[in-house]
Image (tube, grey):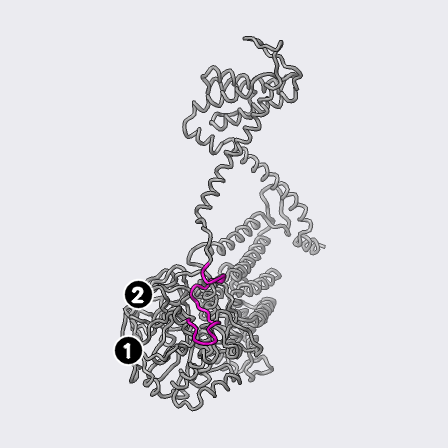
């Protein structure tokens, strides 16, 4: 019974650890506190039912009842009995929470706030998993199967995140599962009987067996591999718009606030980081049959909260199915033309959104994993990314005349687009007062929007700059409207906010301008062409773009008949239904007013001057790897050369100690050694003999360490040498080593270094080419010495580790607890 209670507690703790991945979904930690309460109630009821020796089905019913009581106390409806006993009203409230959770899932992107519906479904799921884990691990004694419901929790963030989930929650959950397995295994072994290590001794109860230790090591290695390997596999890491959020920037001021899109990416922060990069990277290449296309879109932010505009999770159906026909909602005065475009996304851009022109009608070369959201007009995927893809699509370009937009009737108050796209986080007095003054006397929605659009002009003091200024209002929107300095994200979001305050649906769109790199009908779009603009909804026309950002600050800026360039020196009069050619940033940046000195453009964006700084040549990574490999391969040869040089210096010392009698040498005269140092002679002989043995190893001549020097020399002469000079040299080296080992007086006055050279030359002549190459580049003697040294050090380390482990065992908590229990 005690072991079952222990396993039950471990099962409850493992369930909570397995729920760690949910931390990547919620903004706060309320879900964890409530889950701990629910799991604790389930575990307590399970322990009580087992104490009462209830059958397994009784334990299950008791745990479900405990979970219901916990949910009733955590999420009261106000109709409970004694605050914890559920009633039919409580069950109806739970049903409403489940329905509300589905709505919140569609409305919020991760990380989600602590709403009651989402918290309820999270606690219900964790509590249900706790019941299953307890039944499998304790009731059925199948803890391995308990991993399936625990894995169900981990599948939630996997299904929500379009890129990859964080690694730390996975490690925490895996640790909980392994803890459960180890606890059950230890309990089974203790029931079986005494344990045996295999080395002739028993194992105490508190001591881990070698098998258990090996299992823990294998489990740790397995978890580490499960985390590390996905990080090394291309395509398994990186997130939505990951490439758009790497660059640093100084545009920290966010005029409209910031918000996340599907996944967890802040579109505004991503845009700011890319525009402030000094390096230009090609992101998209688009070929279109339209002469002067509008902006290429990939996302929208249409939910306005106190922190600013945020993007909702898109939803839709396969892009390969019939897409909506824009002609079905086109009103009078709307001109529509069909074009064809081919887009190629470079490897520098990886996101779950696909750049397309507005209102696509057909797509090719995309799998069914790519979906189309007709409301947001975006192509997205929950399983793939756009990196390196090439695809084609047909799209409809809608153009409008000012008269057509003026005749558009205001949307009814109950219209879903107006109800959702005019919502604001609350009245801001400065914004309300400004909008009231701008739309005063304007009779149509278009005139109101045009008045707000013209407000963001140089005549009113607005200027373009990549760095914004802080304010004292405490609200970013008020700071921008007061300072009147910013770039596209501030202008787009501020105009959308003001339009919404006027009761007209508006949102912020993200995409690319046409850029300045054009080759015929092909545009090359870079990170400096990333842009944000405002879209306003008109009945009978749909979403109409308005770009309030000053045209001189945006390379490839496009203006239209219904939203002309307010900063142009002269009033433009484009033909009805057509757009002007892309604005030339260099031409439009000429001084036209007092604020032109502050004007800043996106082109170049060199942080140190007007032109990008020249970068020193960068060596490719493979060149550095090749140099490192060559250096590594040269280490054994260099080590062998250094060792030979040191030994050769010692072997030559015998010559320096010799002299001849009478000062003149005669043929056949024997040198006489004067003041010879016996210890030095022995050292010289040992050095020469060690060099000879290493030379034998290098040229693959067997060496027997049990032989005497004379026996080794005789075997060498018999098996490997046939030159008289080499034979005499080998015998000389053997005799010198023999005298140095065993005789009272070592052999002195002999030329050991020439003898070594003669033997080495003879062995090299006899060896094949491969042996000579290895002896020079990878000397086997050096490699053998390294292997021997590593083996000796490993043995010493194992011995020291064993001694330290033996000393630490006396302080092992398991041993101390076992000794205390034995008393």
Disc on the earlier residue, 1 or 2: 2
Q: Position of residue 132 (x, y in %)?
A: 51, 66
Question: Outermost residue toward the right?
Answer: 823
Q: Quadrant of residue 75?
A: bottom right
Q: Which residue was labeled with disc 1?
A: 336
Helix, strand or loop status at disc 1: strand
Q: Observer-nearest residue: 59 or 210?
A: 210
Q: Principal SS element in the magenta part?
A: loop
Q: Is residue 604 magenta?
A: yes
Q: Observer-nearest residue: 752 or 373?
A: 752
Q: Quadrant of residue 510?
A: bottom left
Disc 1 and disc 2 in contact, CB within 8 angstroms: no
Q: Which residue was labeled with disc 2?
A: 287
Q: Observer-nearest residue: 677 or 39?
A: 677
Q: Which residues are magenta?
A: 589-612
- State whether residue 121 appears in this view: no
Relative to 663, does residue 214 appear above or below in the rendering?
Answer: below
Q: Position of residue 551 (x, y in %)?
A: 40, 73
Count of marks, rendered view: 2
Q: Position of residue 541 (x, y in %)?
A: 33, 82
Mark 1 neighbour density, 10 Å: few (under 14) some (14–19) many (20 or more): some
Mark 2 neighbour density, 10 Å: few (under 14) some (14–19) many (20 or more): some
At 32% across and 86% down in the image, what residue appears?
403
At 46% across and 45% down in the image, what residue appears?
625
């Amino acid at each position: 019974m005690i072991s079952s209670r222990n396993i039950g507690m471990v099962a409850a703790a493992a369930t909570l650890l397995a729920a760690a991945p949910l931390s990547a979904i919620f903004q706060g930690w309320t879900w964890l506190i409530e889950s701990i309460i629910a799991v604790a109630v389930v575990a307590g009821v399970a322990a009580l039912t087992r104490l009462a020796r209830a059958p397994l089905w009784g334990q299950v019913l008791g745990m479900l009842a405990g979970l219901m009581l916990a949910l009733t106390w955590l999420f009261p409806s106000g109709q409970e009995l004694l605050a914890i006993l559920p009633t039919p009203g409580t069950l109806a409230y739970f049903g409403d929470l489940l329905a509300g959770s589905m709505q919140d899932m569609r409305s919020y992107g991760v990380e989600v706030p602590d709403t009651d519906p989402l918290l309820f479904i999270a606690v219900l799921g964790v509590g249900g998993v706790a019941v299953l884990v307890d039944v499998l691990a304790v009731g059925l004694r199948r803890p391995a199967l308990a991993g399936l419901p625990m894995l169900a929790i981990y599948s939630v963030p996997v299904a929500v995140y379009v890129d990859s989930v964080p690694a730390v929650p996975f490690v925490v959950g895996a640790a909980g599962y392994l803890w459960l397995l180890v606890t059950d295994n230890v309990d089974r072994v203790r029931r079986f009987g005494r344990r045996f290590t295999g080395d002739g001794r028993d194992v105490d109860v508190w001591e881990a067996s070698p098998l258990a230790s090996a299992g823990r090591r294998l489990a740790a290695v397995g978890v580490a591999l499960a985390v590390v390997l996905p990080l090394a596999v291309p395509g398994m890491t990186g997130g939505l718009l990951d490439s758009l959020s790497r660059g640093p920037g100084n545009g920290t001021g966010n005029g409209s606030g910031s918000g996340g899109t599907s996944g967890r990416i802040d579109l505004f922060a991503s845009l700011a980081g890319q525009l402030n990069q000094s390096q230009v990277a090609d992101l998209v290449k688009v070929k279109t049959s339209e002469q002067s296309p509008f902006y290429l879109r990939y996302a929208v932010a249409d939910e306005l909260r106190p922190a600013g505009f945020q993007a909702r999770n898109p939803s839709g159906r396969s892009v390969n199915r019939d897409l909506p026909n824009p002609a079905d909602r086109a009103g009078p005065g709307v001109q529509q033309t069909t074009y064809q475009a081919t887009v190629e996304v470079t490897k520098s851009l990886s996101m779950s959104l696909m750049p397309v022109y507005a209102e696509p009608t057909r797509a090719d070369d995309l799998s069914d994993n790519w979906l189309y959201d007709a409301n947001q007009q975006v192509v997205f995927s929950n399983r793939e990314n756009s990196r390196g893809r090439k695809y084609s699509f047909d799209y409809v370009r809608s153009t409008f005349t000012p008269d057509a937009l003026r005749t558009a009737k205001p949307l009814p108050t109950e219209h879903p687009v107006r109800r959702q796209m005019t919502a604001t986080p609350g009245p801001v007095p400065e914004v309300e007062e400004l909008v009231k003054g701008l739309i005063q006397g304007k009779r149509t929605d278009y005139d109101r929007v045009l008045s707000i659009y013209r407000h963001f002009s140089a005549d009113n003091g607005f200027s373009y700059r990549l760095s914004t200024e802080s304010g004292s209002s405490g609200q970013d929107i008020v700071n921008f409207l007061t300072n009147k300095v910013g770039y596209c994200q501030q202008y787009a979001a501020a105009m959308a906010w003001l339009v919404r305050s006027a009761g007209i649906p508006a949102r912020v769109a993200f995409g690319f301008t046409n850029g300045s790199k054009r080759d015929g009908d092909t545009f090359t779009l870079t990170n400096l062409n990333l842009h944000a603009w405002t879209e306003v909804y008109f009945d009978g026309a749909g979403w109409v773009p308005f770009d309030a950002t000053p045209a001189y600050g945006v390379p490839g800026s496009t203006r239209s008949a219904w939203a002309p360039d307010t900063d142009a020196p002269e009033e433009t009069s484009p033909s009805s239904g057509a757009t002007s050619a892309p604005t030339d940033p260099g031409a439009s940046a000429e001084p036209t007013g007092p604020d032109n000195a502050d004007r800043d453009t996106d082109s170049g964006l060199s942080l140190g001057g007007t032109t990008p700084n020249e970068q020193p040549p960068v060596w490719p990574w493979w060149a550095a790897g090749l140099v490192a490999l060559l250096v590594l391969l040269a280490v054994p040869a260099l080590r062998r050369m250094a060792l030979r040089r040191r030994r050769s210096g010692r072997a030559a010392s015998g010559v320096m100690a010799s002299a001849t009698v009478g000062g003149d040498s005669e043929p056949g005269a024997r040198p006489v050694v004067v003041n010879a140092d016996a210890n030095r002679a022995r050292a010289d002989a040992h050095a020469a003999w060690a060099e000879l043995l290493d030379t034998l190893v290098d040229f693959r001549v067997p060496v027997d360490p049990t032989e005497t020097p004379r026996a080794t020399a005789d075997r060498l002469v018999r098996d490997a040498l046939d030159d008289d000079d080499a034979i005499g040299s080998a015998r000389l080296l053997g005799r010198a080593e023999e005298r140095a080992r065993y005789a009272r007086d070592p052999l002195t006055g002999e030329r050991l270094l020439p003898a070594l050279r003669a033997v080495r030359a003879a062995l090299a002549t006899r060896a094949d080419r491969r042996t000579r190459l290895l002896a020079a580049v990878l000397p086997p003697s050096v490699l053998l010495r390294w292997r021997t040294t590593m083996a000796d050090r490993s043995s010493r380390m194992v011995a020291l580790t064993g001694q330290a482990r033996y000393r630490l065992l006396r302080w092992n908590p398991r041993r101390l607890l076992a000794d205390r229990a034995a008393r």
